[in-house]
Amino acid sequence: MNQNKRIIIVSNRLPVKLTWKDGAITYQTSEGGLATGLSTIYKQNQNLWIGWPGSAVAEEDQSKVKTDLALQNLSPIFLTQQEINDFYEGFSNETLWPLFHYFPTYASYHPEQWEVYQSVNKKFAEAVLKIATKDDIIWVHDYQLMLVPQMVRHELPEVNIGFFNHIPFPSYEIFRLLPWRKELLCGVLGADVIGFQTYDDVRHFISAANRLAGINGSVNELNVKDRVVSVDAFPISIDYKKYRQLAEQSMTRRNEKKLHKLTNNNKLIISIDRLDYSKGIIHRLEAFSLMLERYPELRGKIVYIQLVVPSRDNVPKYKEIKEEMNRMVSEINGRFGMLGWQPIQHFYRSFSPTLLSALYRAADVALVTPMRDGMNLVSKEYVASKTDQKGVLVLSEMAGASRELSEAVMVNPNDIWNFCETIYQALNMPEDEQKRRMTAMQQTVSRFDINNWVTNFIDKLAEVKLRQMSLATR
Ligand code: G6P
């Protein structure tokens, strides 16, 4: 990546979250993959990251927040409580999120929320336009901001715009259910490069463009009026070296030992997810429960550590899944537990990267079994942390990561009998097979890491611009 242009990143969330501590504003830095991957970019030169700081900020505090964040090349977009309700919780997470994750019956369609989605996207676009020139690169992220590329294109026709969708893009038959499908599609088509996690997402998007807007093109290119638009797969990844180094630290090893001791040297199964119905938490509990029923010899010998990170807790479906999860965990523990042994250790909070690393190291089996997921970086973090190559990744076919991590043990989380047997086999997999599979996956993740992802995307933007220019001079 030989980049002299200024890059403006635009995403719903900034890589910091604003919180209040003892009446004072504090900023919590995100440890997420995107924040790490893009940190090398937005902190440089005149580059900038535009986004929401994660909470409503009173008007009188806004200028202080702006000044604080400007020091880190961050530019906040302030959302009112009404906008948080209708744009973030409403249209983004009660319409687009369930639909794009193939939960159409969970999706609601409220015209008044659609109005707010449009006006908030306009707010983001205006913030971009306030500072951008035609020579900048604008990189817009995810389903919350699908209208921004076209809004920016309208005012700055020559600017180089990228859009990356972190979540799945559904098949046309699902996408067409949206009353505002064409507006959303055309919003995204304002970009020069449209990136998805997998080729299936690419196919679905191209099919939607053909059928909704009559736009044609070749496998990875669309002709949008007089502009060539590239549509391609860029599977996101992690900072492999960072996870590896963390796993090698003596502190992590000590924590790993402690973990083994605290769990009586039982075999360990782990899962780590944001609380979300798309993550397959309930199906996984069912499969685990079935395994304890079918294989009574496992009782007292294994422990399942389930970490669930709170998320979107004002959205009703998330409240429902939390209740269901709590009910099942206590049912399983009550049914199979014995004095001195509890099958599930359940935690509902965030964890530090150091503790997560120790957990990854300690786990004999990691269950990454979403019903649908754009990529799923937990699977890659687990692989990167296994410095001794021992451990088994059980991965859902419905996660984008399954396209790359083909040496994982695959499951369809709906196939509950097979799921149960797969966990059992994973617990009993011979060590040489574990190592063979893990080594192959480590090669993949180390080769295609987050830096690679960023470089590929930015390079593609430059390439498409050149191609557009050469077509224009023909
Ligand atoms: C997914 C989405 C992101 C989102 C994240 C956390 O990974 O692709 O856009 O930021 O979930 O969700 P939240 O609603 O807390 O931003």
Image: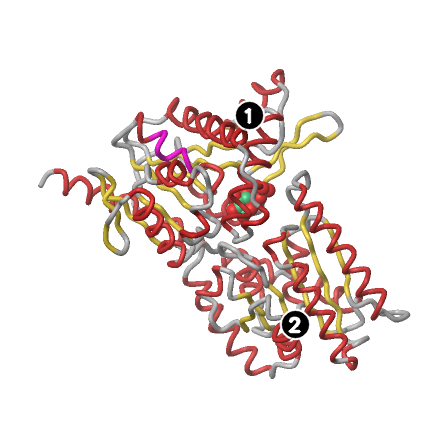
**Disc nearest the viewer among 2 and 1:** 1
Farthest residue toward the left? 474
State whether the magenta stretch is mostly helix, strand or loop. Answer: helix
Report whether residue 98 is seen: yes
Report the residue at 88% width, 71% height from top: 338
Residue 60: image location, x then y, percent: 62, 15
Q: Residue at x 60, y 84 (%)?
A: 430
Coloring scheme of the render? secondary structure
- The dot on residue 364 is 2
Instruction: Report which residue position mark 1 lands on.
Output: 78
Asked whether residue 30 appears in the rendered view, the answer is no
Image position, residue 473 (x, y; %): 10, 38
Q: Which residue is painted at 61% across and 81% down in the image?
A: 429
Q: Is residue 73 above or below residue 242?
A: above
Q: Position of residue 48 (x, y in %)?
A: 43, 32
In the rendered structure, which amino acid carries the disc numbered 2? Asp
Residues in magenta, as a range: 146-152
